[in-house]
Image: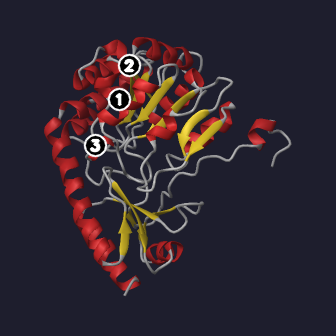
């Protein structure tokens, strides 16, 4: 611990990203899409002139905002883009949750939320999941005071998603603060809440190009909400970094949005593989939580999660192990290609035999 660190830095416990190995392994630990991005992305990369890189990008990313608006049936003024959805979430914490009241979150959800809360001095009020491992919307809505509400839908790392009707019931009860619904995984079987932003000006929906668009390496995220919420995000952005989305990333994002055929084929393949893998894991004695995301959260009825994680790692297969209360026997398994998932099952047959 350095003498030069501020007290705030000393007290931080940073987010720990999934391992990015240098050796050749089957990588099922960071929820990356196993399939390449749309062919049009490659065309953009091949044809892009490096002479453009001497110029700053458009600070408003207007072309990408317009493309997202068209894709989601909203106005461009309802769209904000950033350098990955994590940056968008960070801006949202600063713009909407820095009040003298707690932020309501599920006790098990995306583990970056507590990091941001600590960084920005936001008190968290955590609510346990219900008996079915679902985000308890009634509990989130039931508090008397709050700075806001945030949760992932589908939730991470559990995979369950609430319907738009369930989310609307929450929004009818919570009108005084921002409700942020993080839809990083929505395209793998859930329904988006974006349409609700037209009726509920306090709803902010965030998303990413990292998962269903296969662009984790380019860093693009977005938010959709009322113009006043977008203005709040923009004020934070322009007080931090006016150019979060570079010129090439904007073009790549537009190309990915335009190819709906490729998008649907890839996500449908992931969904099919997920369900086949779920059945195979259950046959091996695993409890598998129902998932509408591109991952499965599982625990074996006999074998310890940490031992299975180590056994898979030793055999060249990476999954995610959360060594924390409530999850310390679970493994989160990203959905890979059919060949990768076959290798996973074959290895688990040996480890659980």
Residue displayed at 36% across by 33% down? 167
Which of discs 3 and 1 lies nearer the camera? The answer is 1
As helix, strand or loop, the secondary structure at mark 3 comes to: loop
The reply to whether dot 2 and dot 3 touch (C-beta < 8 Å) is no
Q: Which of marks 2 and 1 is nearer the N terminus?
A: 1
Q: Name the residue under label 2.
A: 200
- Give residue 7's position: percent from left, percent from top: 81, 37
Q: Mark 1 points at which residue?
A: 168
The x, y position of residue 153, in whole percent, is: 38, 41
Q: Which mark is residue 195?
A: none
Mark sitting earlier along the chain (3/1):
1
Label 2: which secondary element: loop
Regarding residue 343, the answer to whether it shows in the image is no
Q: How crowded is mark 3: few (under 14 residues within 10 Å), some or many (20 or more)?
A: many
Q: Is residue 165 left or right of residue 228?
A: left
> Is 290 situated left or right of 259 in this image?
right
Q: Name the residue under label 3.
A: 190
């Amino acid at each position: 611990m350095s003498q030069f660190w501020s007290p705030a830095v000393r007290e931080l416990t940073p987010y720990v990203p999934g391992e990015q190995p240098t050796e050749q392994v089957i990588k099922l630990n960071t929820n990356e899409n196993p399939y390449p991005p749309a062919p049009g992305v490659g065309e953009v990369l091949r044809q892009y002139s490096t002479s453009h890189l001497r110029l700053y990008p458009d600070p408003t990313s207007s072309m990408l905002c317009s493309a997202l608006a068209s894709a989601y049936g909203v106005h461009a003024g309802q769209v904000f883009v950033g350098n990955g959805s994590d940056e968008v979430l960070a801006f949202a914490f600063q713009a909407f949750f820095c009040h003298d009241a707690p932020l309501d979150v599920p006790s098990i959800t995306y583990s970056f939320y507590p990091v941001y809360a600590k960084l920005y001095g936001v008190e968290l009020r955590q609510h346990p999941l219900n008996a079915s491992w679902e985000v308890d919307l009634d509990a989130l809505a039931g508090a008397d005071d709050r700075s806001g509400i945030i949760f992932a839908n589908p939730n991470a790392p559990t995979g369950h998603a609430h319907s738009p009707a369930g989310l609307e019931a929450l929004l009818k009860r919570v009108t005084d603060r921002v409700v942020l619904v993080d839809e990083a995984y929505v395209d793998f079987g859930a329904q988006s809440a974006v349409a609700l932003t037209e009726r509920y000006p306090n709803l902010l929906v965030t998303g990413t190009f990292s998962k269903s668009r296969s662009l984790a390496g380019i860093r693009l995220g977005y938010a959709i909400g009322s113009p006043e919420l977008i203005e709040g995000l923009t004020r934070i952005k322009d007080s931090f970094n006016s150019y979060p989305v570079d010129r090439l990333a904007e073009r790549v994002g537009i190309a990915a949005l335009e190819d709906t055929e490729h998008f649907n084929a890839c996500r449908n393949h992931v969904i099919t593989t997920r369900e086949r893998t779920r059945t195979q894991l259950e046959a091996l004695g695993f409890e598998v939580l129902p998932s509408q995301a591109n991952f499965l959260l599982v625990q074996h009825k006999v074998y310890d999660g940490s031992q299975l994680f180590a056994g898979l790692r030793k055999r060249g297969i990476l999954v995610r192990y959360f060594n924390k209360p409530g999850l310390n026997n679970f493994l989160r398994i990203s959905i890979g290609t059919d060949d990768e998932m076959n290798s996973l099952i074959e290895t688990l047959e040996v480890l659980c035999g």
